[in-house]
Amino acid sequence: MTPFIFNTTASIVCEPGAARRLGAIAAGRLGDRVLFVTDPGLSALGLGAPAIAALETEGVSVTLFDAVEADPKRATLERAVEAGRTAGVTGVVGFGGGSSLDVAKLAALLLGSNEDLDDAWGVDNAAGPRLPLVLIPTTAGTGSEVTPVSIITVGDNEKRGVSSPLILPDIAILDAELTLGLPAAITAATGIDAMVHAIEAYASKSPNNNPLSRMLARQALQLLGAHIETVVTDPADLGARQAMLLGSMLAGQAFANSPVAAVHALAYPIGGRFHVPHGLSNALVLPHVLRFNAPEAAHLYAEIAADAFPVLAEEPGTQGRCAAFIAALSDLSQRLGLPQRLRDVGVGEADLPAMAADAMLQQRLLVNNPRTVGEADALAIYRAAW
Ligand SMILES: NC(=O)c1ccc[n+]([C@@H]2O[C@H](COP(=O)([O-])OP(=O)(O)OC[C@H]3O[C@@H](n4cnc5c(N)ncnc54)[C@H](O)[C@@H]3O)[C@@H](O)[C@H]2O)c1
Ligand SMILES: [Fe+2]
């Protein structure tokens, strides 16, 4: 067997309503002064209020930092760190979508270690230690609560990552009550993001692609495939919402250890330049990248096709099942009401060459792709998606 390393979050609480018990679950771990990192939309909705109250009941004083924007910028992270330093916090809670969780992870690192962010970019460059950290996702989604990755926008639109097991949290809390009010468009896009994590982890060419990640990816696709339409058409279905949170967490565990590839590499320039949400950027290029990869990866896509779409078990032959899988993903995205073409989200045809050049900056992801992607290939994929 090929050797591998598998890291994940030490403690995972999967229970509707668990965020209301945050004090009982985590106060002992976090210390008596907590930085609570979230975004202004969630703050206005009051979604985090019961979790904050639960900490305060346990005698914890909470400093609220609720200024995280989508695709968070370096300056936002620096302001969060400043708020934490001023309050002398002993622990950090991230509460929200991937954007809030990613800021919380690096805030815990920088507050705990005083290291310079510029020394931490890339893989395994963080020095640590970090402050105690609890992550509570409100989208199902990025899986950031179990990944060693944080993505920050640097300068105008470059997405840069810190990857280190040090920024895995101590505790992840999966509470579907928090996702009941998630708007349909965000529910659909973040759900597709989670499916892409599972697909890309399963087919990843990373030397650390491993049996645990593949098993988790398949279980994730079963949960996500079975419930993604329900949570869009019947948003208050708590059981389906909890299944999506579990599925996105499993997909996160899979790709945290068998990393994602060209779908994400080609999605980042769309998000960076046109402020298209991360999940939607993935959805727009997904079928086109999988079609490009098929000559090398058809057997892998055929293996997982019926996990996401049980009816594809009837599809004969590797090539046929792979093609049916790609078509089923396209149909799903359409049924979920997501835009289908790059031109629908404000991308002009003349923008495509610069996007292809940007995608080449994502070599840390492209090396994991089952088929080598050059700049001309990226441009052809963007043209097909336009
Ligand atoms: N760390 C990782 O491993 C990883 C993986 C994939 C993506 N990402 C990053 O995550 C970010 C995207 O995260 P995201 O897709 O979860 O979205 P997000 O955090 O940017 O949030 C999107 C919007 O959804 C709203 N929202 C979130 N939860 C809600 C709820 N329960 N009810 C109502 N509104 C809600 C927010 O207020 C926000 O306006 C990107 O920055 C991406 O680069 C990180
Ligand atoms: Fe993603």
Image (cartoon, grey):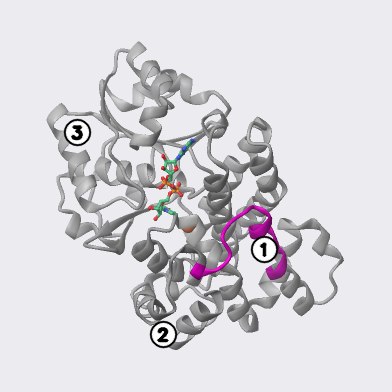
**Picture coordinates of residue 352 (x, y %)?**
41, 78
| Residue type at tag 3 | Gly
Magenta-highlighted residues: 326-343
**Picture coordinates of residue 241 (x, y %)?**
62, 37
* Majority secondary structure in the magenta region: helix
| Residue type at tag 2 | Glu
- Depicted 230 relative to depicted 327: above or below: above
Instruction: Determine contact: label 3, label 2, CB under 8 Å.
Output: no
Query: Mark 3 sits on what residue?
Result: 84
Q: Nearer the viewer, residue 112 or 280?
A: 280
**Picture coordinates of residue 8 (x, y %)?**
46, 47
Q: Secondary structure at mark 3?
A: helix
Instruction: Determine contact: label 3, label 1, CB under 8 Å.
Output: no
Q: Quadrant of residue 277?
A: bottom left
Tell me if residue 340 is in the magenta stretch: yes
Q: Nearer the viewer, mark 3 or mark 2?
A: 2
Outermost residue, bottom side: 376
